[in-house]
Image (cartoon, helix red, strand yellow):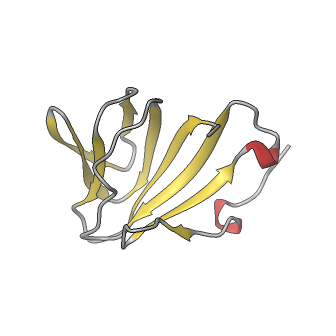
Amino acid sequence: MKVEAYTQTPAEPVEGTPGVTIRWVITRKDGAPNFAMRVIEVEPGANTPYHTHDYEHEVFVLAGQGAVRGQEGDRPIEAGTVVYVPPNEEHQFVNTGTEALRFICVIPNPA
């Protein structure tokens, strides 16, 4: 069992994406065979890339305000919002607020 503060996992910059960091807080290294949990922070005015994957995402917003951009346009998000991104759907997380947008993102373990 792993029990620790998420801040014990170092925040890593997301390559080519200024103002975005990721913490891989639960992975195969922890014995998790199926899913990885990440904590992502997007600074005010920053955003993740507009991209797609062949796997789903489950997201829980912890702090901040923003929008999730998808094929159907922008949808507002804030602390307490949940987001499901189906496989192969283009998406982007945009910080529209004045503090860090922080969210948990769960994905299948990378191959």
Q: Please tell me which residue is depicted at 39% across the width and 30% down the height of the picture.
A: 84
Number of numbered callouts drawn = 0
Image check: 69 left or right of 29?
Answer: left
Q: Is residue 81 above or below residue 15?
A: above
Image check: 111 left or right of 13?
Answer: right
Where is residue 9 drawn, in percent x and y?
Answer: 68, 64
Q: Is residue 97 above or below residue 83?
A: below
Q: Please tell me which residue is depicted at 40% across the width and 43% down the height of the picture.
A: 80
Where is residue 111 drawn, in percent x and y?
Answer: 65, 37
Q: Please tell me which residue is depicted at 82% across the width and 40% down the height of the picture.
A: 31
Please identify the residue farthest to the right as the structure is shown.
1
Image quarter of residue 88: top left
Q: Compare residues 49 and 77 and report the one nearer the observer.
A: 49
Image check: 22 left or right of 76?
Answer: right
Q: Please tell me which residue is depicted at 80% across the width and 47% down the height of the picture.
A: 30
Please identify the residue farthest to the left as the structure is shown.
73
Image quarter of residue 17: bottom left
Q: Quadrant of the N terminus?
A: top right
Please identify the residue farthest to the front as the structure is shown.
111
Q: Is residue 90 above or below residue 102?
A: above
Q: Compare residues 14 and 82 and report the one nearer the observer.
A: 14
Where is residue 101 drawn, in percent x and y?
Answer: 37, 60
